[in-house]
Image: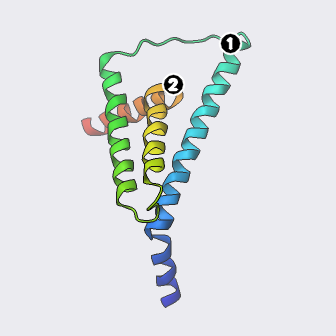
Amino acid sequence: MSELIELLFKITSDECLFYFLQISLVLTFLIALANESIAQYKSGKGSVTLSVERGDESMAKFYGAYIAINSLLVAICLSVDVIQNYKIFWVFFDTVIPAYLCIFNPWSRNKLLSWSHMLTKLEAR
């Protein structure tokens, strides 16, 4: 029983959870990049491409998501002792990757809008 509790404490430590969070961020970045590359490849093969003009409301959602995600990640970076001598690197990393995901990548922006739409429907019930 005590081994299970020790394992639970180890898994939920700052060291494990910080690196799990960073790996999740990198995997999300790679998935978004791959989906964008696939879409560009398909459009080069003669597929139909769609160009969308984003309105002020959707851009506000993208910027709001970026600010929320970035603030959370930077706060975590500044409060974790695991990365004591590398905080500037991790703050920069956790600022650039969410900016790409929330503002520049079309696949992840569409995901953000679908989640926003889903939450709006949930709220309307």
Residue ID for mark 1: 47
Identity, as a three-letter code, of the amino acid under mark 1: Ser
| Sequence-earlier tag: 1 or 2 | 1
What residue is at 65 percent from the left and 19 percent from the top? 40
Identity, as a three-letter code, of the amino acid under mark 2: Pro
Closer to the camera in the image, 63 or 1: 63
| SS at badge 1 | loop
Coordinates of residue 110 in the picture (x, y in percent): 47, 27
- Are circles 1 and 2 on residues that touch, CB within 8 Å? no
Closer to the camera in the image, 32 or 79: 79
Q: What is the crowding at mark 2: few (fewer than 14 residues within 10 Å), some, or many (at least 20)?
A: some
- Residue most extreme to the bottom: 2
**Residue 58 quadrant:** top left
User: For this view, does 117 lie left or right of residue 40?
Assistant: left
Q: Residue 106 carries which label?
A: 2
Coordinates of residue 88 in the picture (x, y in percent): 43, 49
Give me the C-alpha separation between circle 1 and circle 2: 17 Å
**Residue 39 quadrant:** top right
User: For this view, does 105 lie left or right of residue 54?
Assistant: right
What residue is at 60 percent from the left and 12 percent from the top? 49
